[in-house]
Each structure stands twice: as structure tokens, then as C-alpha cells.
Amino acid sequence: MRPKSAPYALALPFLVLFALFYLLPIGYAIWDSLHKRVRSGGFGSSRTVFAGWENYHKVLSDPAFAHGVLRVLAFGIVQVPVMLGLALVLALVIDSGKAKLVRFFRMAYFLPYAVPGVIAAILWGFLYSPAISPIADLLGRTPIGPIDFLGDHLVLWSIGNIVTWSWTGYNMLIIFSALQAIPREIFEAAEVDGASQWQVALRIKLPMVVPALVLTGVFSVIGTLQLFTEPSVLSKLTGSVDSAYTPNLMAYTAAFTANNTNLSAAISVVLALVTFILSFALLRLTWRRALEA
């Protein structure tokens, strides 16, 4: 093999898998979203015909879809900063050199991420359910009174608690890895110049892990718009979560309950575009601030 062709040969397996399991499904989803199934007669066989933008018009004109998008955006505005703030604090504490049992706590913080999302939602659903929740029973014995964590006003933030519990440790490890990559000589020089631990953390460590924070922020935005597992599980426990509570849940319902894969594909494509726009805007804003600095 010629040396010039070696990189292409080595990249070929990845390109094949990338095309089969990424590009091809995306292309099929776009194609499916531009078609619809019609039946000839009342009980005749169905056939697929070109529908143009009809499915997209249904999606964009559906108030339930707009409410679902606004709901997950409101969720992300609150939940993502809280989760990344906790992850940053935990990473700084572990990296400070003052904490004991670092390996134990690093594993303990990461452990919730290892619990499958469905299992985590079921466990927290047990803790939220007013009839059997020990937390609700304990609060009922205090002046605070009983709290319905699955009620209309609190269920979204109950979901946010599950997501924060599950993903804080994952984001903490990414930020902690970025902190470990910083040369220790920088911290030693700062301490020699009289900088305290707080000053080192705020003026040296925090600015140098901004790329890791941006990465986790983009991942969190994508995950927020794809919110599915937690509301899907809690929908079995409360009537506050309906089949269109989030865009992803709406797409799932359209495909597997209404048997309308064309509409589901249109919802997925629109959701992917919204995710791309928000992720690109976040990266563009970060790049602009980095250039200005």
C-alpha cells in the first residue's frame, strides 16, 4: 500500500460505520418526514405518497409542540447552570489537594451516572409518590406540610432533580480531567506569590477550564432538548405529564401510539434543527468572548 493511501484505508472502517449508523438514519428520517401514508377506501391497503411540508406544518402549528419546546428550554435555563455549578464545585474540591478519600468521593459522585436512567426515574418516582414516599410522609409531619412532588407545578423540577442527580458526577469528571491537565507548576508559582486557595481556584483554575465547561454546556443543552426517559417513567405515576410533555415524548407517542412515523420524523427533524441552532449559538457566543478576551 502506498503511504499516501494509508490514512484513507485506516479511516475507511469509521467512515463506513458513520455512514451506516449516522448519515443513513438522518437521511431516512428526512425522507420519511416528507411523505405520508394514505389508504384507498375504508379498509384498503395503505401506500406512501409525497406530502411535501405538510408534516412540518402540522408540527409547527401544533400548540402542544411549542409548549413542549418552551418547557424544556425553561427546564434547561434553571437545571443546566445548577448542575454544572455543582459539578464545578465538586471538581475544584477534589482537585484542591486538601480533600481526603479523593478516589472514594470521585467514584461516589460518578456512581449515579452508572445507574440506568429508567431505574433512576423509578427510584425517584417512589420517593416522589405521595402515597408511599418517605420524604412526603416526613414533610407531612412538619410545619411545611405535605408536598406533591408530582403535581402540575413541581413535576418539572422533580424531573430536574433526577437529571441533576444522574449527570452531575459525569460532568464533574470532565471538568476534573481538565483541571488535572493544567501544569502543577502554575499553582505552585501562584502560591509562592502569595495567592490563597480561593484565588488560585477563581483566577487560575476557573478560566483554564472554560473549554471543559463549554463542552459540558453543549452536551447538557442537547440532553435537555432530548429529555425523554424521566417524563416517560413519571407519566405512569401522575397525570401532570402527558404524551406531549416534551418534544421527544411527543415524537415517541406519534410513532408508537398513533402509528404515524411520518409525523414523528418531522418532529425529530425540527427538534434536531432547534438543538443545532442553540448549540451553535452557545459555541459562537463562547468563541466571541474568547476572542475579545
Image: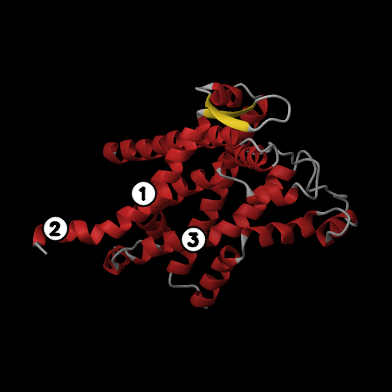
Q: Position of residue 259 (x, y in %)?
A: 66, 38
Q: Position of residue 227 (x, y in %)?
A: 60, 45
Q: Which quadrant does the N terminus fall into? A: bottom left
Q: Front-most of 241 and 133?
A: 241
The residue indicated by pointer 2 is 5
Image x and y of residue 162, in percent: 66, 54
Report the residue at 50% width, 28% height from top: 34
Decide: is 198 above or below 36.
below
Q: Secondary structure at mark 2?
A: helix
Estimate the spatial distance between the alpha carbons at disc 3 and disc 1, rounded to whole Å.
Answer: 32 Å
Using the numbered discs, state the Cα–Cα distance from disc 2 to disc 1 in whole angstroms: 20 Å
Q: Quadrant of the C terminus?
A: top left
**Residues tagged 3 and 1 counted as in contact (Cβ below 8 A):** no
Q: Tell me the kind of residue under disc 1.
A: Ala
Q: Amino acid at mark 3?
A: Met
Q: Residues within 10 Å of mark 3 (few under 14, many from 20)?
A: many
- The answer to whether residue 115 is left or right of residue 285 is right
Relative image position of residue 80 (x, y in whole percent) = 54, 46
> Mark 1: which secondary structure?
helix
Q: Nearer the viewer, residue 87 or 70?
A: 70
The residue at 83%/48% (across/down) is 147
State whether residue 271 is above or below residue 81. Answer: above
The disc label shown at residue 172, or none:
3
Whether residue 36 can be seen here? yes
Residue that carries the numbered disc 1 in the rendered image: 19
